[in-house]
Image (cartoon, grey):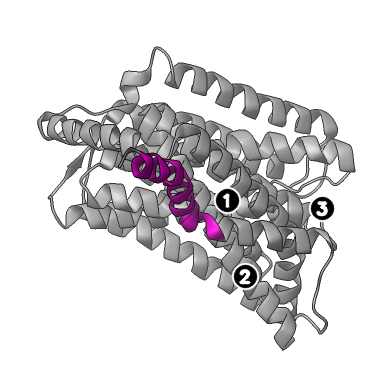
Amino acid sequence: MTHEKSQASAHAPRVGLARRLRPDVPVFVGLATAVAVLAHFSPGGGPTGGATLAWSLWLVAAILACAFRAMAHADALAERFGEPLGTLILTISAITIEVAAVCAVMLGEGGDPQVARDTMFSVLMIILNLLAGLAMLIGGRRRLEQDFNAQSASAYLPLIVALASITLILPRFTTSREGGWMSDPMEIFVGVSAFVIYALFLLMQTTRHRAFFAHHGTSERAADEHGAAHAATALHHGPSAVFSGVMLVLSLLAVVGIAEGLAGRVSHLLGALDAPSALGGVFIAALVLAPEGLASLRSAAHDDMQRSINILLGSALATIGLTVPAVLAIRFFTDSSPELGLDPPYIVLLMTTFLVSAIGFSRGKVHAMQGVVHLLLFVAWIVTILDEAGAGG
């Protein structure tokens, strides 16, 4: 009996590891795909050829699968570290994916200097209008209003507005260069200021201002107790922090490699279909935000609007605070300068979004009618993209 027990215990870790690795099969498939991409594997045919489309769809599926696994492991780490560190892990993981995708498009064959601008603007419009609007509608099914700590929104929004104005609006009105471009000193100022402001925000968020990003109402105390019990269960039965950390890194590496091959295909396909180039930024933003967006909507459905707000506004701030410095740093190594200034119609939509968000989030309560307004702004943005493409044609 003792011998049988020792044999069983000897085999238990192996079975546990196999069971633990089973959900991460897409990560290893994604890593193999990334190796093929970096080895310049490419099926023959034009941008709309059957083999090329099939390979492009495979890359999209692989990058989505790896992104979801990355967010799953980031979420496991978030359960262990709690708020706000948990949300920071989720946010920085998503931004790593975004920066990889943006840089791949900028530096790839036929690189697009506007992709960073289009992606950042798309992320802001998707987060502040589509996802925020859906979260309000989903949360409104169970309660007339959903509560959250208004101090969190008042901490996020001014920084988002300031950084977005400096990076996406100001370059359109500077006179050192025509269009939405900036001079070298201006680029240095924008990149450094974005990084410093975001770093200072992280320092304050994780130290003396932690309470701004938590909500402890009457109903929330019960939710906190349930969350604590769930976290305790995860500590005993979930994957270890080391395992989650390793798989998170592998997932992100797979995403970075696949993005290298997907980048050029997106621009070529849009050109072949005569589609607006701005849709490339929308596509990248949708890929980046898919896992995190679902997490925010799931939180709203579980009556946890505070976590949803932290995820959404934290992602919006990190998008500007980390993507801009990364893109501009790469610019000085590759001499590929990005055009960051938005065109006037999009400036109007962005400022309207900021105004509506500032008003709606100021009370610490949101409801479904506010969600309808945000969704209207999202639809107006898509219609504007298509309208400009029609006028240009």
Q: Position of residue 190 (x, y in %)?
A: 70, 30
Residue, disc 1: 121
In-image side of 382 versus 272 (left or right): left
Task: Based on the picture, tell me whether residue 4 belongs to the magenta stretch.
Answer: yes
Q: Amino acid at mark 2?
A: Glu
Please tell me whether mark 1 sits on a helix, a strand or a loop: helix
Mark 3: give few (<14), some (14-19) or many (20+) Cα within 10 Å: some
Label 2 to label 1, Cα distance in Å? 16 Å
Task: Based on the picture, tell me whether residue 87 belongs to the magenta stretch.
Answer: no
Report if residue 205 is visible in the image. Answer: yes
Label 2 to label 3, Cα distance in Å? 26 Å
Marked residue nearer the N-terminal end (2 or 1): 1
Name the foreground residue: 54 vs 104. Answer: 54
Marked residue nearer the N-terminal end (2 or 3): 3
Q: Amino acid at mark 3?
A: Leu
Which residue is at 41% across, 58% downward?
Answer: 377
Name the foreground residue: 85 vs 289. Answer: 85
Q: Position of residue 390 (x, y in %)?
A: 63, 78
The disc at residue 388 is 2
Observer-side mark, 2 or 1, equals 1
Mark 1: give few (<14), some (14-19) or many (20+) Cα within 10 Å: many
Q: Position of residue 107 (x, y in %)?
A: 82, 52
Residue, disc 3: 107
Report if residue 157 is visible in the image. Answer: no
